[in-house]
Amino acid sequence: MNMIFLGPPGAGKGTQAVQICEALNIPQISTGDILRNAIKNGTETGMKAKSYMDAGQLVPDEILVAIIRERLAQDDCANGYILDGFPRTIPQAEALEGIADIDLVLELNVSDEVLINRLSGRRVCPACGATYHVNMLNGSTKCEKCGAELIQRKDDAPETVLNRLKVYHDQTQPLIAFYEARGKLKKFDGAKDQQEVYAEIMEAIGTNA
Ligand code: AMP
């Protein structure tokens, strides 16, 4: 099944996508991760994307559409996938219609207040990618999985978080109506407990399979 995760930054898309992809044995395709890797590796795409990302702005559509076109052509996508963080604009969604058949769009809805708290308290491991909230760390600054020093993503800084939420409301939220009109949207309350949301999503996937 080909699926999209839609929702504001910090709604839990990444966390849910990892778990669901593991259960279904399909790839999670996070455009944010692809772009962060491109920056780390100093590629041309990475160099073009960096200033937009640091400011919490969207990277231009043509760059993202090229990334997704290439990624979805790979063999591991043959049995389905979850897109996490793409599409984020109507032009991206329109371009995607010419590239792939999407079966289901999962929307995670969370209030701005909860998101601001989640994102500004988020810490990530630069070595293994694990994600934490400062409230879970009891003052520790090290990754519980691999021991590396945790960092705050540049775009999780408080002023950038507000900007990302504005960008979400202005440019990405219209996708909800776009996919609703196509009868593909299922909504979930992302403020609920993570495992509860996971169970609800798995049930929705099961009834759509
Ligand atoms: P994320 O990890 O999904 O929050 O993405 C981090 C940043 O990568 C975003 O704030 C954007 O700057 C950029 N990005 C990721 N996916 C997209 C996309 N589909 N369109 C435009 N920019 C994107």
Image: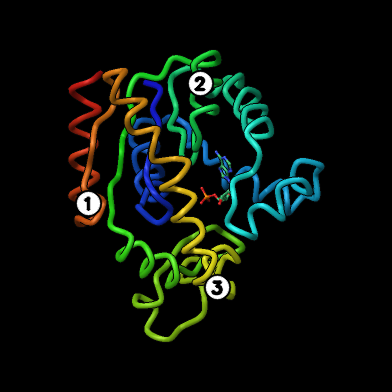
Q: Would residue 71 appear left or right of 39 to someone viewing this image? A: left
Q: Residues within 10 Å of mark 1 (few under 14, many from 20)?
A: few
Q: How is the image coloured?
A: rainbow
Can you identify the residue that label 1 sits on?
195
Residue 40 rendering spot, x and y as whole percentages: 73, 54
- Tell me: 41 left or right of 171: right
Q: Is residue 160 above or below residue 31?
A: below
Q: Which residue carries the number 2 mark? A: 94
Check disc 1 and report its element: helix, strand or loop: helix
In the image, is residue 82 above or below residue 167? above
Q: CA distance from mark 3 to mark 2?
A: 38 Å
Is the Cβ of the residue at disc 3 closer than 8 Å to that at disc 1? no
Image x and y of residue 119, in percent: 43, 65
Q: Quadrant of the C terminus?
A: top left
Name the residue: 48% across, 60% down. 130
Q: On the image, numbered disc 3 is attached to which residue?
A: 150
Which label sits in the foreground, 3 or 2?
2
